[in-house]
Image: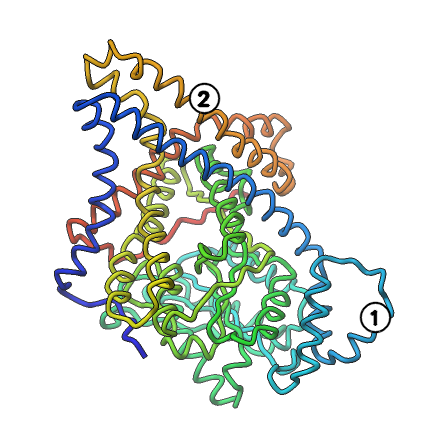
Amino acid sequence: MTDIEIPVGKRTARYRFLEMLPGFLTYFFIALPVVLSLLNPLWAAIFIVGYIIMFFIKAIGMAYRTIQGYNFLERARKLDWYERLRELEDPNTSLEAHHKIRSNRSWMLPQHIDNLQRIANEPNSYMKPSETFNAVIIATYNESREVLIPTLEALFASNYDMQQLILILAYEERGPNKKLAEELAERFGRRCSFAAAVGHPSDMPNEVIGKGGNITYAGRYLQTLLENKHIDPDRVLVTTLDSDNRPHPQYLAYAMYAYIIDPNRQHRAYQPIALFLNNIWDVPAPMRVLATGNSFWTIINSMRPHMLRNFASHSQGMASLIQTDFWSTRTIVEDGHQYWRSYFAFDGEYEVTPIYVPVYQDAVLAETYTKTIKAQFLQLRRWAYGASDVAYVGDKGLRSNISFWSFWPRFLRLLESHVSWATAPIIITFGAWAPLIINQEASRSIVAHELPQIASQLQFVAMFGLFITVYLTFKMLPPRPVRYKRRRNIFMLLQWLIMPVVSICYGSAAAVYSQTRLVLGKYLDKFDVTVKAVKK
């Protein structure tokens, strides 16, 4: 198997170049409107209009994917996935029942019947649901009882047989949650097949301080447990959750259903839709804009298989995790990195399958407004540090035997996504004004004067996607808490006026910061735990 570890210590010259590449490209594209404005305003206008047109085309595609993804989400979470999972137990009998009820036109029914037929024809190639287990690892560091218990209650409210659930509460020995984790493992262990609190030792060699080491240690504990109980790892689907992640009641059954019917399950991950809506009514307006935007971004990506990656909570077969030695312990972005880790471990034969039901998560909320503002930046800085994968992917890919058409499109999309993350809000907001502000001679240019108006018109049309987002946001919001009056709805609408400012101050700033750290070789080696305050 290909070496899939992130290098420790000094990097090679090629690896260092690839680490600096996102930052260099970001600086180049931010500076380009300024340089072109000084040289020739017409060149600047061509670049800026071209960039905005590219953004306009993307916005149309994103608007379409938003509507499509929302419809998939609504249909999928209305289905009884546990019933469909149980039908896999005896596919022949289930097929007979479906043939008798021809009027049933529920969503994805033809695919379900095809799955039943395939399993009936090849019974030895598939496992029975009664022979499988869902293992859930919940990572915790310093979260309170008020955060953890709703997560566990949501998990145990699942439409699923709890005697097929294994629960691991993965706490940090350097943190304060040992006693709470042990108490909750004992309390909820009575309701499932097995539960344990597993403490991750501090100061493990060659590990950054982060979630990856914690859940990997818990995963190795789970591997030993399965060996002792003589349970085949291929029959176990492992889901990782953060302490505030509340899975939809259908998630466990839906994910297991997708796992069983997949003949290539060892080369797959299963990705739910992350919706940051748990506490959306309580957080400040900038955090609401970011949380809602992030929610719809996960919906959009669920409709783009070529872009779908492991993110936050996700599921993967235990046999697959054993082959990759679980998650990386050398990066603070172990979720997205797990995609690339598995991609190279299986020589390019690895994909992520969308699960169209949500795992609800918290938007960022700390004890005070100032702390919330800071905590939000730290979270986005950590996400943006995924730019470190550019060097990992480029270096591994150039030394692998993976085909050109598999590797290079993925690598270029990864690079482009991080550069656009840092540059797009700045160029779209300020680029059209650069010739007039920077070059005095441009004041006599008709092109320079018309450019802001042209850009504004294109941006306005592109904002159609935002209107769709706002409309769907109000349909997806949880019920308004009684402590808020109806005028809170008005603020939920007006908050979108600050989106350009939020995009620059958080999106661009966090991405530029992380990419600059990589340019300077100042690596982030500590996972900044996002504060999870609860408003009572």
Tell me the quarter of the picture where residue 256 sits: bottom right
| Res 123 label | none
Tell me the quarter of the picture where residue 446 sits: top left
Quadrant of the rendering where the C terminus is positioned: top right
Residue 121 horizontal side relative to residue 441, left or right: right
Name the one closer to the observer, 43 or 473: 43
Name the one closer to the observer, 524 or 173: 524
Identify whether 9 is placed above or below 488: below
At a point 54% along the width and 30% down the height, the residue shown is 464
Under tag 1, what secondary structure? helix
Identify whether 1 is placed above or below 521: below
| Res 457 label | 2
Q: Position of residue 127 (x, y in %)?
A: 62, 82
At a point 31% along the width and 40% down the height, the residue shown is 422
Quadrant of the rendering where the N terminus is positioned: bottom left
Name the one closer to the observer, 60 or 356: 60
Residue 363 horizontal side relative to residue 453, left or right: right
Disc 1 marks a residue whose amino acid type is His
Under tag 2, what secondary structure? helix
Q: Position of residue 359 (x, y in %)?
A: 55, 55
Disc 2 marks a residue whose amino acid type is Gln
At a point 65% along the width and 78% down the height, the residue shown is 129
Residue 480 horizontal side relative to residue 533, left or right: right
In the displayed image of the protein, which residue is found farthest to the top?
A: 444
Task: Provide the residue designation for mark 1.
Answer: 99
